Amino acid sequence: MIRIENLSKTFYDENNNNIEALKNVNLEINEGEIFGIIGLSGAGKSTLIRCINRLEEPTQGKIYIQGEDITVYDKENLRNLRKNIGMIFQHFNLFSQKTVYKNIAFPLELEGLSKDEIEKRVDTLLEYVGLEDKKYAYPSQLSGGQKQRVAIARALANNPKILLSDEGTSALDPKTTKSILDLLRRTRDEFGLTIVLITHQMEVIKDICDRVAIIENGEIIEINTVEELFKNPRTKTAHEFISRIKSDITEEIIEPNESSATIVRLGYTGENAKKPIVSRMVKNFDIEVNILSGDINRLIKTSVGHLILEIQGEDEEINKAINYLISNNVNVEVM
Ligand SMILES: Nc1ncnc2c1ncn2[C@@H]1O[C@H](COP(=O)(O)OP(=O)(O)O)[C@@H](O)[C@H]1O
Ligand SMILES: [Mg+2]
């Protein structure tokens, strides 16, 4: 269905230094497969998935979709290609000024469908994702999970053959993540869609993927079935991803109070582990923080560790707080 051959992508930073985001990537993804690509932040996941619909131009290599080389496509061919490829994102990318209805109708309006056809199609999609009652709501009135359902409905509007998910569940709590993954699985089963999803969460791979590729520093270092990966990981990185899941089990014992709260995992290393960054964050922003779990002894002894926080507040304040952490060199994962 999708064949990627010797794909490379080089960016240049402001000092004109090379950033080799992808190095000679080879992958084959089968029709109807849910294929996961996992890697740490900066590994090249987004660049890779964006090459598949040519939101990113490859520096080298070929990408074949249903046998056709899409790297030579002109504008007109690209337009048709993108109709056949839906995409969802971590932060949903909905139009905040448009209703749910208008968001989903948007790609259909671009296609020039009649008002009646659009309304019929949108209603079908709303029913499919279970949001009939939110037709005239605005994105700000929806939970994260509902927003992603709208984004999925919009991505499916033109009956695509392929769905790409760039960290589509990374901003959601574990329970909502499961419900979105269920919806994606149902979409594959009912429409025979091929789904390529990238994630940094092994839970997502475990729950939904048939096969997985591990990407590290722009290179695919392992391709495996998910079952084999758990039974017999071939690389050290695969081991590490799996052991992270196991250690998360104890963390799940503490249930967050507020299902709509944002859960973040903070990774501390070296200097920043000694600074009172979290207490400063609480003072600086209009948010409330609960500590769900943390490895604080180890943190004090070795200056490395982690903390899992539940943050409540307006999205905007939460985003500011997260940016504050990032600017203090804390590694932040929204869970
Ligand atoms: N437009 C860009 N310009 C320069 N560097 C970029 C650009 N996009 C991504 N990169 C770099 O390419 C590498 C891979 O990024 P990305 O694909 O976003 O990783 P991931 O999605 O795995 O976190 C990173 O080093 C990132 O900084
Ligand atoms: Mg990314």
Image: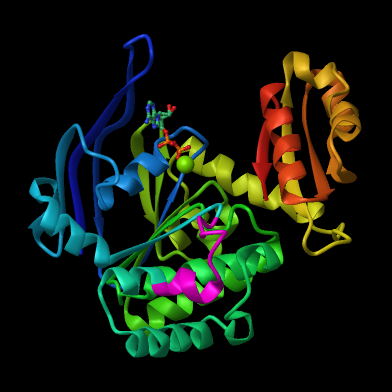
Identified at 28% across, 41% down, the residue is 56
Q: In the depicted view, which residue is nearer to us: 295 or 239?
A: 295
Q: Find residue 257 and report its horizontal and vertical position in percent.
A: 89, 61
Q: In the depicted view, which residue is nearer to us: 301 or 124?
A: 124
| Ligand 1 picture quarter | top left
Identified at 19% across, 54% down, the residue is 3
Q: Is residue 29 left or right of residue 70?
A: right
Q: Find residue 172 and report its horizontal and vertical position in percent.
A: 65, 58
From this viewpoint, which residue is outermost toward the top? 15
Give yes or no for residue 57 being in the magenta stretch. no
Identified at 9% across, 59% down, the residue is 68
Question: In which quadrant of the rendered image does the N terminus lie?
Answer: bottom left
Q: Find residue 181 and report its horizontal and vertical position in percent.
A: 54, 69
Instruction: Say above or below: 287 vs 117.
Output: above
Give yes or no for residue 102 being in the magenta stretch. yes
User: In the rendered image, which quarter is residue 216 located in?
Assistant: top left
Instruction: Say above or below: 9 vs 29.
Output: above
Can residue 108 be seen here?
yes
Q: Is residue 172 left or right of residue 152?
A: right
* Residue range corresponding to the magenta coloring: 92-105
Q: In the depicted view, which residue is nearer to us: 301 or 53?
A: 53
Can residue 177 be seen here?
no
